[in-house]
Image (tube, rainbow, N blue to C red):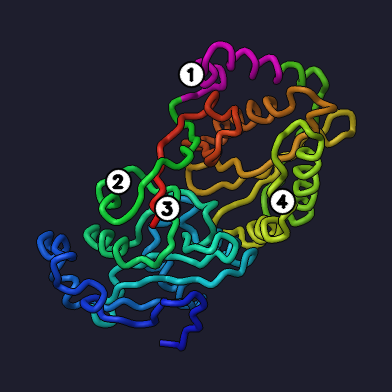
Amino acid sequence: MKNINLEPPGVFQIQPLLQLIPNIRSNKYFYENGLAKFIKRLTLKVHSDIEECNLLWEKFSPKKSLFDLWDFRYAWHQGYNYMPYFYTLYDGKEPLGVLPLYYSKCNKRYEWFGTNWMEDCSFFVKDDKLVELFLFIAPYPIHLNAIPQKYLDKMGRFGKVTNDDPKNEKEVYKYSTIDELLLSFNKKHRYNLRSSFIKIQDMSPRVIETIGNNPQLMEVLIKMNIDQFNTGILEDESDLVLPERADTYRNIVKNSGVYKTKFIQIYIQNYLAAIDFVILYKDTYYSIKGGNDVRRFDGIGNYIIYYEFEDIIRNKFSKINSLQIDYGWKHRFFDQKPLLVFER
């Protein structure tokens, strides 16, 4: 294995697991729960070489979700350039699991590889019993977000577990028309969505869809998203003012291939009223980022939501993921699935 340049203090390169979890009274739990056999024979290695990390990721990732894809995660690594720390348990030369981390210089803690923006964060292990070993030996301080509820029983013993922002999803496969889908919403929200759509439709909008690697459209989106926040209508500042974040989005487009990127532009009276950035992977439609001219075109945000729901039904996607953080409106149209945060 290549030499690894470790930045934070106290991180080792290779160590027998028995040295990290010795058979003493305070570690009694591990020796009475069928884990002793692992502890005696496993070795922990910390990988920071990006090529080695790539190989480990490809070996263990289930590739079910966009967030399971190396090309997507690597875009975030390219943007932030933080040192990866892939905690890997070996039985001889065979890796049995990996905890894919990186050290956030900004937050001064270990997080999932790809920043804490990630979702669908599961543990990459051949045996679920290894999850508890990883949580016990994980570096400190650590913050692991967007963990599914199924891991709740495994985490509380080893650190602080709190509720994360829920994931906003909507299963759409059961609806054959937009009218059927709208009936699943609250009456008031359904009315507002329809009325905004009709209002914008009366302005004869021109919709342009572009699928594929288009860096020019990403620049348009970055500018429009920043401008939307600068109007003062939204309280927060656009995250795209951060050079690292903007570069990350550029790299997401460049790295597309396994996943597809799509831009939806809405023109009204020769003005760009809205642009939305969507990622398509398997049966899921990911609504990632957008920019709207809300001052000139009232209701354009609802119009985009309505249009994308139609787009999903028309192209037979099973579900849409609108990501975490509600922003005060997502709960109106999406089902919220609880997620957890593990900290120590």
Query: Which quadrant holds the N terminus?
Result: bottom left
Question: Disc 2 versus disc 1: distance between alpha carbons?
Answer: 30 Å
Residue 78 relative to residue 246: left or right = left
Left or right: where 256 falls relative to 98: right
Which residue in the protein does label 2 denote?
152
Sequence-first tag of 2 and 4: 2
Q: Secondary structure at mark 1?
A: loop
Is 177 part of what is drawn in magenta? yes
**Hey, what amino acid is under mark 2?**
Leu
- Residue carrying label 1: 184
Q: Which residue is mark 3?
A: 121
Q: 311 or 154: nearer the eye? A: 154
Where on the picture, by quarter, is residue 273?
top right
Q: Earlier in the sequence, mark 2 or mark 3?
A: 3
Taking the image as shown, residue 68 lies to the left or right of residue 24, namely right
- Cα distance in 3D space between marks 4 and 3: 23 Å
**Residue pointed to by mark 4:** 240
Q: Residue 33's x, y, as percent? A: 12, 59
How far is the residue under mark 1 from the one under mark 4? 33 Å
Q: Residue at x 53, y 60 (%)?
A: 114
Q: Position of residue 212 (x, y in %)?
A: 67, 53
| Badge 4 amino acid | Leu
Q: Point out the tag, 4 or 3, that comes first from the N-terminus.
A: 3
Query: How many discs mark residues in the rendered view?
Result: 4
Q: Secondary structure at mark 2?
A: helix
Name the image quarter holding the C terminus: bottom left
